[in-house]
Image (cartoon, rainbow, N blue to C red):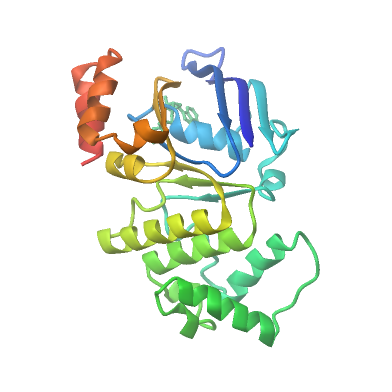
Amino acid sequence: MIRLEGIVKTFHGGTADENPVFSGLELAIPEGSFVTVIGSNGAGKSTLLNLISGKIFADAGRVVINGMDMGREPEHRRARYIGRIFQDPLAGTAATMSVEDNLMIAARKGFRGLRISLNAKRRVLFRDHLSRLGMGLENRMRDNVGLLSGGQRQALTLLMMVMSRPSLILLDEHTAALDPRNAARVMDLTCSFVQDYGLTTLMVTHNMAHAIRYGNRLLMMDGGKIVLDIAGEEKTSLTVEGLVKRFADLGATASDALLLARSGA
Ligand SMILES: Nc1ncnc2c1ncn2[C@@H]1O[C@H](COP(=O)(O)OP(=O)(O)OP(=O)(O)O)[C@@H](O)[C@H]1O
């Protein structure tokens, strides 16, 4: 379970550039939920993920992860519990290390500091994991990761994140920079990992169709607020047009609604 309680965040407070983004944000995400997050530019989606991951701190409020208030814990401490994947497919892996050495980093994290080594048994396990990606990486375990394509690297990042056994995963438009075929493959893998490992997931996307199709709950953000929170049956029967209409009904300007609709095209 993750809970955000009374989150307040203002950038450049007390200066001419003061930008209040959150003023008392509340959000509870039960364990095993897969939540998609959508919203127009500047709505606060990345700031939300940054506050959860510890990249930035809130001015006030609590970030409760597994019952512990981690709001003041630095990012590297929260990284034990939180996995994050960014849009840039090169960001989550070490280019100058081999595929198997990258996997070892993730495995060590998953074993929470226990001493484990790269032996024959572990290589068999890695090969099994890699073959699940369906990208032929099981035959390239000693290749440097820098030789892989963007789609292969993002799939590897996803696998590494799962192996590190996080309590929560944050997906920050993680398929947006991939070509459509690789984006679909990485999205399929994401869903099967989330399902198989019961991972609590927060996925920011600009693709409204994805926000509707994936996950069991959809949040729409606007101006630092959660303006729509849709789950269950209601989410299953949503359409892109219906979602745009609901956004417009909230009093958004026509241009805002159009922008959102275009971003989902
Ligand atoms: N590090 C920062 N310093 C100053 N202002 C920031 C910072 N990060 C975000 N902001 C501001 O906070 C507001 C919310 O930005 P955020 O990046 O969270 O929006 P977003 O919903 O992720 O938008 P996009 O879809 O364009 O990525 C914006 O006004 C942005 O300029």
Q: Nearer the viewer, residue 170 or 96?
A: 170
Snapshot quadrant of residue 203:
top left
- Residue occupying the far front of the picture: 233
In screen coordinates, is 192 left or right of 253? right
Q: Nearer the viewer, residue 217 or 76?
A: 217
Q: Quadrant for the N terminus, please.
A: top right
Which residue shows up at 57% across the image and 63% down it? 160
The percent coordinates of residue 133 (x first, y second) are: 44, 70
Which residue shows up at 19% across the image and 27% down it? 258
Q: Is residue 162 above or below residue 143?
A: above
Q: Is residue 77 above or below residue 138?
A: above
Count the marks: 0
Q: Nearer the viewer, residue 179 or 19?
A: 179
Q: Quadrant for the C terminus, please.
A: top left
Q: Is residue 38 visible?
A: no
The percent coordinates of residue 14 (x first, y second) are: 56, 12
Q: Is residue 67 above or below residue 125?
A: above
Q: Nearer the viewer, residue 128 or 25?
A: 128
The percent coordinates of residue 104 (x first, y second) are: 65, 71
Q: Is residue 228 visible?
A: yes
The percent coordinates of residue 70 (x first, y second) are: 71, 34
Snapshot quadrant of residue 124:
bottom right
In screen coordinates, is 246 left or right of 69? left
In screen coordinates, is 36 left or right of 258? right
Query: Which of the four quarters of the rendered structure image does ligand 1 lie in?
Result: top left
